[in-house]
Amino acid sequence: MNSIIDKVSVISSFDFLPEIESSTCKALLKYCEINPGHSLEFCQELFTEFYKFLSMHAAKLNKDHHSKVFPPVEIAKVWEFHIQNTAKYPLLCEKVNQKYIHYRPELYNFEDEAVERGLKELYEETLSGVKAMFGALNQKVWVSFEKVKKGYQSTFNVSLKRLKNLLQDDSTVNSKISQIIKKSFESANFSIPALKLVEKSEINTEAVEKIDKISFPKDFLQILCQKLLISPEVAVTLLTEYKKFLLMSIISQFPIAPSGFVDEVWHLHMLFTREYLETCKNLKGNVIVHVPLIENSVSEKENLQEFYQKTVQLYEKTFGKREEACWPEHGEKGVDAKLEHTFIWINSE
């Protein structure tokens, strides 16, 4: 660990980094673990370039709070990784900007020439901003716009190997998926059902009303479908179960833990930072904290499993029999584990 800390300290010249050195290095190791295709050295470079990017973005926001940026997808992934540690991310923002730096996931339509041209210009502005503040760019991270475009067209939370009879061109795959999902949403009106409690539930009706009044972003379901390669109907089911999790977070007297499936929805909700913070404020008055498993220690996993079992018990007491597909017995991680039959399969015809 000391060698990692030394390397991060050497290649990073930010005043705030030594103050969060230990947690930064733990996060770095975790990011390497969940991205096995990246070497430790490349992850270090990514983190460094992300801190440069965030510092530049913060400086631009100080001059113009409407300022926009368009980072390469690898930087965007590191940004999302930091946001999902809801306790640490605000501290990082304070170090570079003294404000909370907001984020919002998007579905970019690169088939629209005007959209592509605008994104290319924004990417070049982002490059220029980082270069102006920090000098030479790391070419392994700050790649050409064509590579950035392809990167955004290939970002899924499930492996493309899960799809059957696909063309090898990732951009074609993405285009087909986008078209299917878009048509699904155009042809049907998907609504999120109100929560139903068991008859003898003692839950305050005011809490239930707060949950049912949550307004999710307009494109939330579509992005969820795109990220997890699931049908809109399954996305609605997962979102409903996530609403139940939010209610339990209000009423529980102990820490609770979602299943892997519900956690995926939570992850996405957090990335709509403005909406998520507003939702938390309305529900609890403060942020519903999400702390990822960083150390992956035995005790950490045992605590999580204990919290999950208590969560399942609270679920059944509050809502009745649980949806086993969404809340498996041990909370297995990964959407393709139990919902395989619901995935959108695309053939090459």
Image (cartoon, grey):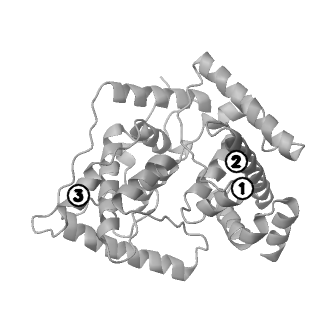
Q: How far apart are labels 3 and 1 at the CA level?
A: 38 Å
Q: Who comes first in sequence, dot 2 or dot 3?
A: 2
Residue 298 seen by the camera = yes
How crowded pointer 2 is (Cα within 10 Å; few <14, some 14-19, many 20+) is rated as many
Q: Confirm or deny contact between disc 2 and disc 1 (CB under 8 A).
A: yes
- In the displayed structure, does residue 172 sit left or right of residue 5? left
- In the displayed structure, does residue 144 sit left or right of residue 303? right
Q: Confirm or deny contact between disc 3 and disc 1 (CB under 8 A).
A: no
Q: Which mark is residue 208?
A: 3
Q: Who comes first in sequence, dot 2 or dot 1?
A: 2
Depth check, front residue: 131 or 152: 131
Residue located 28% across and 61% down the image? 324
Tag 1 secondary structure: helix
Residue located 40% across and 75% down the image? 255
What kind of residue is marked 3?
Answer: Val
Residue located 60% across and 70% down the image? 294
Q: Residue furthest left?
A: 199
Q: Confirm or deny contact between disc 2 and disc 3 (CB under 8 A).
A: no
Q: Which mark is residue 96?
A: 1
Q: Which mark is residue 15?
A: none
Residue 307: x and y in percent read 39, 76
The residue tagged 2 is 58
Residue 181 lies in quadrant: top left
Residue located 77% across and 50% down the image? 52
Residue 165: x and y in percent read 51, 33
